[in-house]
Image (tube, grey):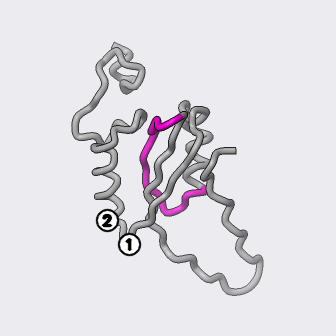
Amino acid sequence: MIDGFPPKPPKAPRHGKLTPLPKRYVLYRIWGEGKELLYIGRTSNPYNRMCAHRLETPWWPKAKRITYQDYPSDKALKEAETKAINTEQPTYNIQRRLRPTYGPHSDRAPRRLLAT
């Protein structure tokens, strides 16, 4: 089990009126061994997002710990995510970086660059 993996949300009741949960704006960091920062992202549902990472990302087996920060709005969250990615340079974030930190022969390069 990864330290910080969010608990599964409670199931909705089968009958009766549902009470909507408040909207969450969460910035998360996924850490590997030691202080290696693997990925920074944003979500409104940490449990579902971590399950998606677990199923879809090849670097997930390196994940050891996850940390979370809540923000008051989506705008504040997007700004914080962009700033964090550009400042902290996580290994597997490439889409929101101001300047890419990989070359065409890097293992972190997009596949379209590796295919050439």
**Residue nearest the observer in this picture, 3 or 22:** 3
User: Is disc 2 in contact with disc 1, using a CB cutoff of under 8 Å?
Assistant: yes
Q: Amino acid at mark 1?
A: Pro
Q: Which span of residues is magenta-colored? A: 34-47
Q: Is residue 36 left or right of residue 82?
A: right
Query: Which residue appears farthest toward the right when viewing the image?
Result: 14
Indicate the quadrant containing the C terminus: top left, top right, bottom left or bottom right. Answer: top left
Q: Amino acid at mark 2?
A: Ala
Q: Which residue is mark 2?
A: 76
Q: Is residue 60 above or below residue 50?
A: above
Residue drawn at 60 percent across, 52 percent down: 4
Query: Which residue appears farthest toward the bottom when viewing the image?
Result: 17
Q: Is residue 85 left or right of residue 59?
A: left
Where residue 100 appears, as percent x and y from the top left, is 27, 31
SS for dot 1: loop
Where residue 53 appears, as percent x and y from the top left, is 56, 43
Q: On the image, which quarter does residue 15 sit in?
A: bottom right
Q: Which residue is mark 1?
A: 72
